[in-house]
Amino acid sequence: MSHFEEIKAFTQIVEAGSITAAAERLSLAKSAVSRRLSELEQRLGVELFHRTTRKMILTDSGQGFYERSSRILADLEEAENAVSQAHQELSGELRVAAPLSFGVMHLGPAITEFQKLHPAIRFDIDFNDRQIDLIQEGFDVGIRIAELEDSSLIARKLASNSIIVCASPDYLDKYGTPTTPEELIDHHCLTYSYLPNPNQWNFIDMLGQVQTIRVKSSMQSNSGNYLRDAAIAGLGVLRQPTFIAYDEIKKKELVPILQDYEIPSVNAYAIYPPTRHLSQRVRTFIDFLVDRYAGEPYWETCLH
């Protein structure tokens, strides 16, 4: 058994999460992948995983070996791609993870345009608001819309996203228009459950002072699109990124309120694992997104 095959099997187990899933990715029998892992551990003289009945967890030695091995394999793939693609079109698989609303509404059309330019690229796309571990789950690129925590991932900014507070004209006619953040306490509010503190809404006043309001949630959901539609139906006040509600604001189905107060915006980033040489197809795709969203995003024009 070659060292390369052992290492490739090991990295696939880490990224897929199990020997069974790695075997499916490699189109091998589960026993063959298990044997390659055992032979690698015997050759290295260390255990790379803590094995339980439910999952396999990297040991400290396994984590260090994975970080180095994945970079070596990425370098090898990049070297092969550099030679094979020097006079060929981009090809291969691109695994992309993106938030559901932003992904379907804005990333989807970009992917469609990119694939028309590079038809030999095969996309595997996960539209999901959960925070995906790119390395563990084997994704090439992730789109994050958040304040990024410190991590080993590399990030490139794609676009800014303003946060607005809004409600339907019917709701404001019935319950009145709040003129200060404190007045939100007496209103029905629609909250997004994937935020760390869904009921905590922050505002910055004209003096630069931060005001934190704990609103009462009359409805909570993990779907920004559903909350937008609930706000249009007059069910409450909504705090949401412009990239979801921009069209409804333009149509005046939703009315921005509390515009004398600033709400900290969040940026959209393309993130990817750190390798010395990013594959050409991943690099080209990220460059394409950066160019596509350069300048003021079209969803921000609803505020003018």
Image: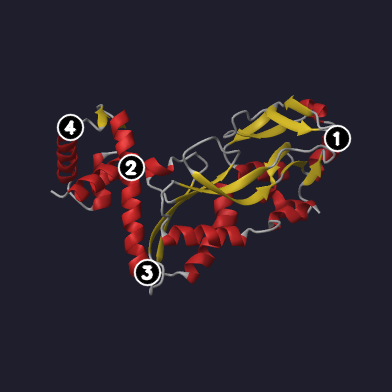
Q: Say whether residue 90 is left or right of residue 143.
A: left
Q: Nearer the viewer, residue 197 or 151?
A: 151
Q: Disc 2 versus disc 4: distance between alpha carbons?
A: 17 Å
- Image-quadrant location for residue 20: top left
- Callout 4, which amino acid? Gly
Instruction: Kindly identify which residue carries mark 4.
Output: 45
Q: Nearer the viewer, mark 1 or mark 2?
A: 2
Name which residue lies at 31% across and 51% down: 73
Helix, strand, or loop for circle 4?
A: loop
Using the image, tell me which numbered label, if any, was put on residue 68: 2
Which numbered disc, 4 or 1, marks the residue closer to the eye?
A: 4
- Hey, what amino acid is under mark 1? Met
**Residue at the image position 33 percent from the left and 69 percent from the top:** 84
Residue on which the image places disc 1: 206
Q: Residues within 10 Å of mark 4 (few under 14, many from 20)?
A: few
Q: Which residue is mark 3?
A: 85
